[in-house]
Image: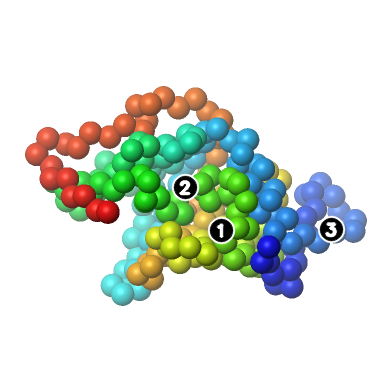
Amino acid sequence: APANPSAGGPSDVSPASSGGTSTQVTAAQILARAAAAYADVQSLQADFAMTMTNPLLRRTTNSRGTLYQRRPDRIALRFSEPEGDRIVGDGEYFWVYYPSVDEKQVIRMPASQGASGGVDLQAQFIGDPTERFEATLHGTEDVAGRPAHVLTLVPRAQVGYTSLKVWLDTRDYLARRFEITEENGSVRRFELSGLRPNVRLGDDVFRFTPPAGARVIDRR
């Protein structure tokens, strides 16, 4: 599996330990642990703060809300800022509705095309992520006071984005931060907080009905 053990070689040490001998780990080993961790997660809920940087427009926007996921294919981002914006994957379609931009437009894409891209972290890690990505390990950084392994993942196949950078908690190997570089050069960074794995999430969380009078634009 492609990895870069020379790129910073983090210490996989429990925060409770001090002065002991660290154990060096590789990107492949970290990804294997992340895959095992996400395999045990049937659902999750977390608050997010997202920063979107568009280098072409030289513009940065900030938003926040709540992320919901439920295996195998349900995902929803419900925004509190801008209030009412939604991104919903219901298993059949992936819906994007930004009333803050245009309250009369809804974008719909087939879920089979993996339209959620790097936002669906479970889809990226379940299975063998080393088969899907070229991985580079950058060391460790603190995220909200907890150490995290930092890796850049470049997909081997076309998946709608060019790279995914993740900060995986050294204790539970779930991401607390991730950054998606889109094909157009735009970058979306998500900061996750209050992460709650295996919460009970009903079907209504992942249901979307276009508002009356809105035009639905199909993208394939």
User: Residue 120 got which mark?
Assistant: 2
Of mark 1 and mark 2, the one earlier in the sequence is 2
Provide the secondary structure element on which disc 3 rests: loop
Q: Residue at x 12, y 35 (%)?
A: 212
Task: Tell me which amino acid carries mark 3.
Answer: Thr
Tell me if residue 140 can be seen. Answer: no
Q: Is residue 184 left or right of residue 27?
A: left
Which circle's residue, 2 or 3, is located before the other in the chain? Answer: 3
Estimate how packed mark 3 is, as few (under 14), some (14 to 19) or many (20 or more) residues with alpha carbons within 10 Å.
Answer: few
For the residue marked with disc 1, what is the amino acid?
Arg
Counting labels gives: 3
List the residue tagged with mark 1. 132
Q: Residue at x 60, y 54 (%)?
A: 129
Residue designated by label 3? 23
Q: Quadrant of the N terminus?
A: bottom right
The Cα atoms of the two marked residues, 2 and 3, are separated by: 30 Å
Asked if residue 186 can be seen in this view, the reply is: yes
Judged from the image, the secondary structure of the residue bearing numbered disc 1 is: helix
The reply to whether the C-beta atoms of the residues labelled 1 and 2 are less than 8 Å apart is no
The residues tagged by marks 1 and 2 sit, at their Cα atoms, a distance apart of: 14 Å
Q: Nearer the viewer's eye, disc 3 or disc 1?
A: 1
Query: Could you tell me residue 46's position as x and y percent?
Result: 49, 40
